[in-house]
């Protein structure tokens, strides 16, 4: 990821979108999640962290790429916002931040996390959230035609490998730790077209 953020113009990075996705905007504007302490896991260049901060949230972004975190800090500073950014592996030890956040979300990050690492990751999300905290997760669906359209593992033009999930897989992952409020496959507008994604809105037990 550091190589991608360091070598490509931000406008060329497929997932780096300045405007927040419709699902996140809807959750905020309709008050399903009100201003609170929020964390984005896999925040990239910080666009959505900044969006939430502009709407009254106390925001933190976490990303494995130091370059991306540097870009995020610069963006927040340019907007005059006090956002917190951390460089860390979201699959690693997050106990220092336990019970810190009311809202956690990952936007199209889960397909970068392979099945053998997902239990550790989802346990981290659970640890980060306060009791009854809300969790939003959106990732590529196996029904999406991107990158060959077949198979669970698909290689992108950037030579990253993504894992395409089913609703049943995601339900099995989430259900032991979260109350599932929404879990369905939706069309999502990406930078270069529409794709199918699994949208989950959850609450910590």
Image (tube, helix red, strand yellow):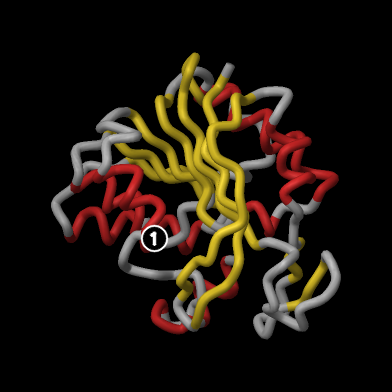
**Above or below for 44 versus 137:** below
User: Which residue corresponds to mark 1?
Assistant: 21
> For the C terminus, which image quadrant?
top right
Residue depicted at 85% across the width and 70% down the height: 151
Q: Nearer the viewer, residue 83 or 70?
A: 83
State which quarter of the image contains the N terminus.
Answer: bottom right
Q: Nearer the viewer, residue 19 or 95?
A: 19
Give the residue displayed 56% in from the left and 75% down from the top: 4
- Considering depth in this image, is 171 or 39 the residue closer to the camera? 171
Measured as percent of width and height from the top left, residue 89 is found at 63, 45
Side of 135 where 25 appears, left or right: left
Q: Quadrant of residue 100?
A: top left
- Relative image position of residue 18 (x, y in whole percent): 32, 68
Q: Position of residue 81 (x, y in %)?
A: 19, 47
Quarter occupied by residue 34 = top left
Instruction: Specify whether 162 is left or right of 27.
Output: right
Residue, x 72% and y 49% (percent of image)? 167
Residue 41 place in picture, x, y as percent:
52, 45
Q: How many marks?
A: 1
> In what element is the residue under mark 1?
loop
Q: For the residue carrying disc 1, how many other residues have a C-alpha within 10 Å: few (<14), some (14-19), or many (20+)?
A: some
């Amino acid at each position: 990821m550091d190589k991608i953020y360091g070598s490509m113009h931000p406008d060329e990075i497929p997932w780096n979108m300045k405007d927040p996705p419709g699902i996140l905007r809807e959750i905020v504007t309709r008050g399903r999640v009100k201003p609170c302490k929020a964390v984005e896991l896999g925040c990239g260049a910080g666009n959505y962290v900044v969006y939430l901060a502009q709407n009254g949230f106390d925001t933190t972004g976490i990303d494995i790429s130091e370059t991306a975190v540097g870009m995020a800090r610069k963006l927040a500073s340019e907007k005059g916002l006090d956002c917190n950014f951390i460089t860390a592996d979201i699959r690693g030890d997050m106990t220092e931040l336990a019970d810190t956040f009311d809202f956690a979300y990952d936007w199209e990050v889960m397909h970068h996390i392979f099945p053998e690492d997902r239990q550790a990751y989802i346990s981290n999300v659970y640890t980060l959230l306060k009791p009854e905290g809300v969790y939003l997760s959106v990732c590529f669906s196996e029904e999406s035609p991107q990158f060959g359209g077949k198979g669970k593992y698909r290689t992108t033009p950037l030579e990253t490998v993504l894992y395409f999930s089913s609703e049943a897989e995601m339900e099995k992952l989430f259900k032991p730790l979260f109350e599932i409020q929404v879990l369905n496959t939706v069309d999502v507008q990406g930078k270069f077209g529409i794709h199918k994604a699994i949208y989950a809105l959850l609450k910590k037990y």
